[in-house]
Image (tube, grey):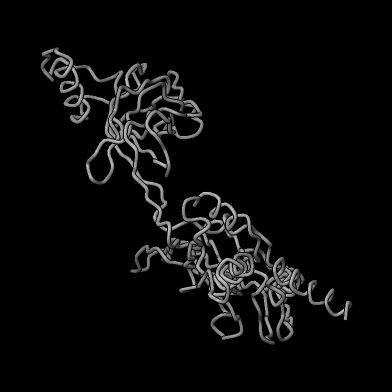
Amino acid sequence: MRLKVIFLVLVIIVSIVYPLGAASYLDPVVNIGDITRIKGIRDNQLIGNGIVIGLAGSGDSRRSQATVQMVANMLGNLGLDIDADEIQSGNLAAVIVTAKLPAFTHAGDTIDVTINSLGDADSLQGGTLLMTPLKAATGDIYAVAQGPVSIGGFNEQAGGGNRVRQNHPTVGRIPNGAIVERELPIELDNSQLSFLLDTPNFETADFIAKAINNNFQYLYGSMPVADAVDAGQIQVQVPAKYKNNLVSFITAINNLQVRSSMEAKVVINERTGTIVMGHKVRISTISVAHGNLTVTVSTNEEVSQPYPFSEGETTVTTDTDIQVKEEGGHLVVLPAQGTVQDLVTSLNTIGASPRDIIAILQQIKAAGALHAELELI
């Protein structure tokens, strides 16, 4: 009887710590807080237009009327009445300032800002951003940016049009360059919370709901604490014990570990020849033949000269030569239920390059043998 009790306790412990026995061992074990966020807690985008000064002749030209008008307006606000035609903008640049306002940021905190040239400036190197209000989509000001701009590179020009440039000189950053002036109100419901998955997946959502229920079921008796609504949302009832202490409850849930499942998917970047395949990708039995066919068409123009004393005319003729070269092809057979490793090994065997593999994968998908989503980016 004692052994049965010990065995039952072990089963309960294992079900609490590892509620995912059916999950693939290749799926990583992660904290719930690393793959979810709470509904209502989000970042917000800020934007503003400003002026960068102190540029050594690399600023906007007079063709950039926006810069001239902005400087005239700024000087007018400072009590200086200057005509726009009198402004030389070589040391100035109109810019767009963007920033991200994280959740739970308080007044007085600082955030990073990104500076983007708006006119035809050559470089923002050595410039300083003047005070620039940053607004949300509602038009309300939430932060104010100011400070020296760092472009992380250089743009130098010598005589004769020679130029040396590193990185992108018309885009810069100011670390901690904006001071938050207004807070975003965030109110959490102390009766129910919704956890949203960063990557929606039915299996992962089910794992999370089971992990939460296994750890907090004792507070509700037979009623479930968490319920997976869909592939991307898990609703959690807040126990009475934590209604006045949501931080501890959220922390406890975020620290729970689950297996993060993934979809069978192949992502291809045709521009760079990059291929990323998940471990769940499966391939049916299929034969793949690979061989390069090179066709060279060359055209030469020649002059056709008629015989002496003939009535013919000198003409230009075209001589076309076509050469076809085909390398020896290879034929491989991928086994049924083949894995990514089988696919890569087989394609490497026939000497396929990344771009060849992209074409082969597309044809395997067209043949219905690739059991995964194929995404081109």
- Residue at 57% across, 52% down: 251
Left or right position of 210 against 49: right
Between 177 and 216, the one lying in front of the other is: 216
Q: Residue furthest top?
A: 80
Residue 357 at x, y = what percent?
63, 69
Between 166 and 193, the one lying in front of the other is: 193
- Residue at 53% across, 54% down: 250
**Can residue 326 be seen in this snapshot?**
yes
Classify residue 284 by image quadrant: bottom right
Q: Quadrant of the N terminus?
A: bottom right
Residue 74 at x, y = what percent?
19, 21
Classify residue 205 by image quadrant: bottom right
How many marks are shown on the rendered structure?
A: 0
Left or right position of 231 against 23: left
Residue 313 at x, y = what percent?
34, 65
Between 83 and 358, the one lying in front of the other is: 83
